Image: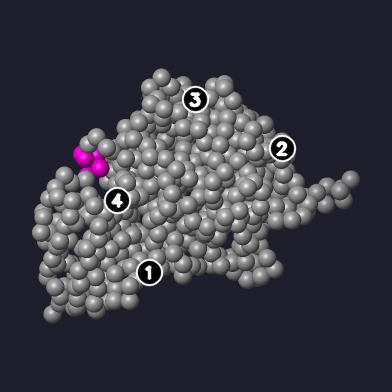
Amino acid sequence: MRLLLLLQLFFMAGYAQNYHTLWIPDTLSGTTFNLSAKDTFQQFLTGNQTVTAAFNGSFWGPTLFWNKGDTVHMNITNLLQDSTTVHWHGMHLPAVMDGGPHQVIPPNTVWQPYWKVENNAATYWYHPHLHMEAVEQITEGLGGLIIIRDSVESALPLPRTYGVDDIPLILSDRSFNASNAFTDVPYGDSMVTNGVLSAQYTLPAQMVRLRVLDAAIERAYNLGMSDGSTFYVISTDGGLVDTPVAVTRFLLSPGERVELVINLTGKSGSLDLKAFNSALNNTIGGGENFSNGPFANALGHKDFAVLHINIGAQTSSPVTSLPAWLTTNTFYNADSANLTRLVTITDSTGVTNPPILGPNAFILDHMLFSMTYNNYTVPYGNTEIWQITNSTNFGHPFHIHDVQFYTLSVNGSAAPAYQQGWKDVILVEANATVKFIAKFTDYSDTLHPYMFHCHIALHEDEGMMGQFIVQDTASAVSTGISTLNANATDFSLFPNPAGDKIFVKQADEGRNIYYARIIDHLGRTCFMLPRPDLRKGFDISSLSNGHYFLQLTDDATKLNITKPFVKEQVK
């Protein structure tokens, strides 16, 4: 008996040594943010380091803190060997700033989008959205969280100390080859939380807020506590729910976020936040149990820990209860909808041009995504119901850009209470129909579209995506389109040669500029500035001396005019 006890203690101690402390991403706050995407590496396993990519680090990027009502200016520098994009997932913003597959950032280029933050307080994220490269770039580690604050959320007695009782959790999985390199697969063999294998963290014995993102390529996580305890949903993708919703399981699919509060008051020792994926059937990502082939993985249809929690002492000002009421959401009424759009998730039977993986690949409305085809033109100001019908035998997380929506029904019934909040991703299960309602306002753009797609990155890369433009035909006010003559504006540059800044003088000062690009003498893009403020000029201090071109795209006509200039050191 004594020998058995010693053996148990030995194996428990050995297992504990396999835990690694959860990394809490650094934070950036303010209104101007500098993010550099670069190729790098990280030590995941013994032996070779793993080649990764990240913003400002080695795997995942910093958490960005924004305040609702602020205008944020992003300086995105692409130091990767390949082009990329940065999509601001969940944000309501102009299409030209959205960071979808049309806003490509070439290597050694700076992209400078900006917009007013109009989203509610919640957890959002940023990630690459380069068409046909999403799996590779997300696998490498490009992405990060965004936390928005507003006056409603800030007034509530909620856990809010980042890294102490307010914990970011980015859930994903990875597989490694014999050289410790990532393999680009739908499902990894190892759970990775915030870039850490077998993660553990010490949390205080009180109410603790978990901001959870499913950043996996395909896997869903059926979240629950190992002791079976109840926890509370306080926020969905786009904001607080009206009242905390008590649950013992929450199924999180790729791209979704949820804010959970777990109650550790009076507890000691340790427990796990787990994925109870053995309860999922094979129509949900991660519920399959393939023994071989490209979808085989060690975590398939199994229960596993996503975070080992050690319970520590309370903080000096613990939150030990939740408010009964969080907010009062006003959702759109179905009767206010101008129309209902019908989208069907289909297989690829009969779609052979261009060739894809075969008839079992998934697409939308039997159509492969095309960068040059707009599936819909949405009138500016429309309130619309989107009905998503899944005719396949596999569940798909459906994501739409620009808007937060409210789920009207799932298979004709009201959505579960824990999903009755603002959303931008909804899991449409096999052979199910989901209806949601959204309003398309504030921004219109006839050149750059918004996207809608399955947020399983593999399916997105294969062409399970569509796009729409929001067009204002009644007014030029919201679009910024000038009502002057239809010719693109001419302009001159001064001073020329220039040192640190160069300014534009337009022949027609009333014209609005849609886009500005600075291009070097070899034709490489150096800066991309959507809707620039010409009064401030262009900062060229980081450019090397030499010959360049400034290209302006007129807002009304979308025509380009290009002028040369010389950058030289001012003496």
Q: Earlier in the sequence, mark 4 or mark 3?
A: 4
- How dense is the environment of label 4, judged by Cα within 10 Å: few (below 14), some, or many (20 and up)? many
- Residue at image coords 37%, 29%: 383
**Residue 454 seen from this side:** no
Image-based side of 525 in relation to 57, left or right? left
Where is residue 237 drawn, in percent x and y?
A: 47, 37
Looking at numbered disc 4 in the image, what kind of residue is underneath it?
Tyr
Farthest top residue in view: 335
Looking at numbered disc 3 in the image, what kind of residue is underneath it?
Leu
Q: Which residues are magenta?
A: 476-480
- How dense is the environment of label 1, judged by Cα within 10 Å: few (below 14), some, or many (20 and up)? some
Question: Label 1, on which residue?
Answer: 108
Q: Quadrant of residue 432?
A: top right
* Dot 1: element: loop
Looking at numbered disc 2 in the image, what kind of residue is underneath it?
Asn
* Quadrant where the image shows the N terminus: top right
* Dot 3: element: strand
Question: Label 4, on which residue?
Answer: 114
* Magenta stretch holds residue 432: no
Q: Earlier in the sequence, mark 1 or mark 2?
A: 1
Image-based side of 367 in relation to 501, left or right? right
Question: Label 2, on which residue?
Answer: 281
Q: Give the overall secondary structure of the magenta segment.
A: loop
- How dense is the environment of label 3, judged by Cα within 10 Å: few (below 14), some, or many (20 and up)? many
Where is residue 17 drawn, in percent x and y?
A: 68, 56
- Residue at image coords 38%, 47%: 449
Image-based side of 201 in relation to 124, left or right? right
